């Protein structure tokens, strides 16, 4: 039988099904179930501990020359963000500096593609130091986080890493005492 794995799905639930399918295909059903349970437990933890709180207004963007690719409403990244009680700010697929400033997000996740992973901290520093962004809440409050692309796009078994990273960035107070 053929097992269909949807790596490019825009919904978290579909990635969980893909992990189950990979587990079956490789004879690793228990490990796949552990991964799915780990994802669901992290989401439950965040949702239970942020119930009734405001969802941080968030941009998930990747620098593309003089503009940004926005991982907006219909992306896996935004779906993960919603599951961990963030509020993705939706714009067109590509946005300019002015739209980033006008959005004034509380949190920014800077997506870094695989050929630039080694430059992640430099990319963040350049963003944080850019005079155009000094009035943005996320910059002023040091809530700009680098997020490797593999955590939020075709992520399969790395989806948990994206959930965990976004949860930490959105709700750091939940992780201070427990050291998670």
Image: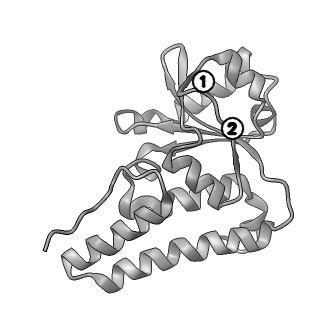
Identify whether 112 is placed above or below 169: above
The crowd level at tag 1 (other Cα within 10 Å; few <14, some 14-19, many 20+) is: few
Name the front one of labels 1 and 2: 2
Question: How far from the left and from the top, in percent, is residue 31?
Answer: 35, 81
**Residue with the mark numbered 1:** 126
What residue is shown at x 53% (from left), y 28% (from top)? Answer: 93
Q: Is residue 106 left or right of residue 84?
A: right
In this view, the residue farthest toward the front is: 1
Instruction: Please tell me whether residue 84 is drawn above or below residue 99 in the rendered image.
Output: below
Q: Is residue 42 left or right of residue 7?
A: right
Which residue appears at 65% of the width and 17% of the height?
97
Q: Are marks 1 and 2 in contact (CB under 8 Å)?
A: no
Q: Relative to the observer, which residue lies in front, 66 or 89?
A: 89
Disc number for residue 27? none
In this picture the colour scheme is: one colour
Picture coordinates of residue 45 (x, y %)? Answer: 68, 74
At a point 67% along the width and 18% down the height, the residue shown is 130
Report which quarter residue 142 is drawn in.
Answer: top right
The image shows residue 107 at horizontal and vertical percentages of 72, 42
Q: Secondary structure at mark 2?
A: loop
- Left or right: residue 164 versus residue 19 is right
Reading the image, the residue beneath label 2 is: 89
Q: Which residue ends up furthest to the bottom in the rendered image?
A: 30
Element on which disc 1 rests: helix
- x and y percentages locating residue 5 in the rendered image: 28, 62
Distance, label 1 to label 2, CA atoms, is 22 Å
Label 2, residues with CA under 10 Å away: few <14, some 14-19, many ≥20:
some
Closer to the camera, 56 or 91?
91
């Amino acid at each position: 039988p053929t097992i269909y794995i949807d790596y490019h799905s825009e919904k978290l639930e579909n990635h969980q099904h893909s992990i189950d399918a990979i587990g079956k295909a490789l004879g690793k059903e228990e490990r796949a179930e552990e991964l799915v349970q780990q994802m669901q437990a992290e989401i439950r933890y965040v949702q239970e501990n942020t119930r009734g709180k405001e969802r941080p207004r968030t941009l998930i963007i990747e620098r593309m020359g003089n503009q940004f690719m926005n991982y907006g409403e219909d992306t896996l990244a935004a779906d993960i963000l919603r599951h961990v009680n963030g509020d993705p700010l939706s714009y067109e697929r590509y946005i300019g500096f002015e739209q980033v400033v006008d959005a004034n997000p509380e949190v920014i996740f800077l997506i870094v593609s695989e050929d630039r992973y080694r430059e992640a901290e430099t990319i963040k520093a350049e963003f944080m130091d850019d005079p155009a962004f000094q009035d943005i809440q996320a910059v002023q409050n040091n809530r700009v986080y680098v997020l490797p692309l593999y955590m939020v796009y075709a992520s399969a078994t790395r989806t948990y890493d994206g959930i965990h990273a976004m949860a930490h960035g959105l709700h750091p107070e939940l992780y201070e005492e427990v050291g998670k």
